[in-house]
Image (cartoon, rainbow, N blue to C red):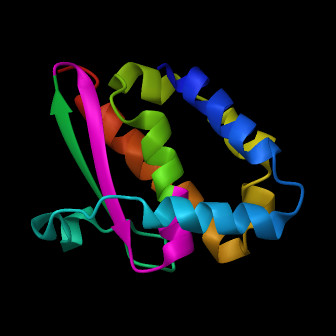
Amino acid sequence: MTIQETEEAIVGEFSVFTDWMDKYEYIIELGKSVPPIAESARNEGNLIKGCQSRVWLDCSYSEGKLYFSADSDAIITKGIISLLIRVYNGQSPKDIVESDLSFIQKIGLQENLSPTRANGLVSMIKQIRAYALAYMNK
C-alpha cells in the first residue's frame, strides 16, 4: 500500500467514532498491538527528543525501503507512534520525505492532544523524516 492508501484506511477507521474518547480508546488499543521493540533498540540513541514520554524509534533500511519499530512507556503515545509506523513502514525515503501526513488533520489527532503530546507527535514525525533524509541517497 502507498502512504496515501494507508492514510485513507486510517481515516476510514477513525470515521466510525463520533466521540474523541472512543478515538482515544482506539489509539490505546493500537498501542497494545504494537510488537515489542528489541531490547537492544531501547537505547539512548533511539530515544526521541521532545517527547514527554519515553519513545524509542528504531529504523532499518532494506532494498530501498525503511522499516520502523517503536516502543513507549506511555500507552497512548505508543498508539500514536503505531499510526506513524503503519503509514511509513516499508516506504521509500523519498516517499516519506514528500508525504504530508494529511490523515493527522483529517482525524483531528493533533488538535485533540494535550500540548505536550502534540509536541511529541511533531518530534516523532521529525525523527522519522530525519531517518528518511539520511537514507535518501543510498
Instruction: Please say whether residue 123 is visible from this viewpoint.
Output: no
Farthest residue to the left: give it: 40
Residue in view at x 40 percent, y 69 percent: 49
Residue 23's image quarter?
A: bottom right
Residue in view at x 56 percent, y 71 percent: 76
Looking at the image, residue 121 sits to the left or right of residue 129; the answer is: right
Picture layout, residue 43 above or below residue 18: below
Residue situated in front as seen by the camera: 122 or 34: 34
Residues shaded magenta: 63-80
Picture layout, residue 68 above or below residue 5: below
Residue situated in front as seen by the camera: 69 or 115: 69
Q: Report x, y in % for residue 122.
A: 57, 56
The reply to whether the magenta stretch includes residue 78 is: yes
Residue 95's image quarter?
A: top left
Looking at the image, residue 60 sits to the left or right of residue 98; the answer is: left
Instruction: Please say whether residue 39 is visible from this viewpoint.
Output: yes
Residue 65's image quarter?
A: top left
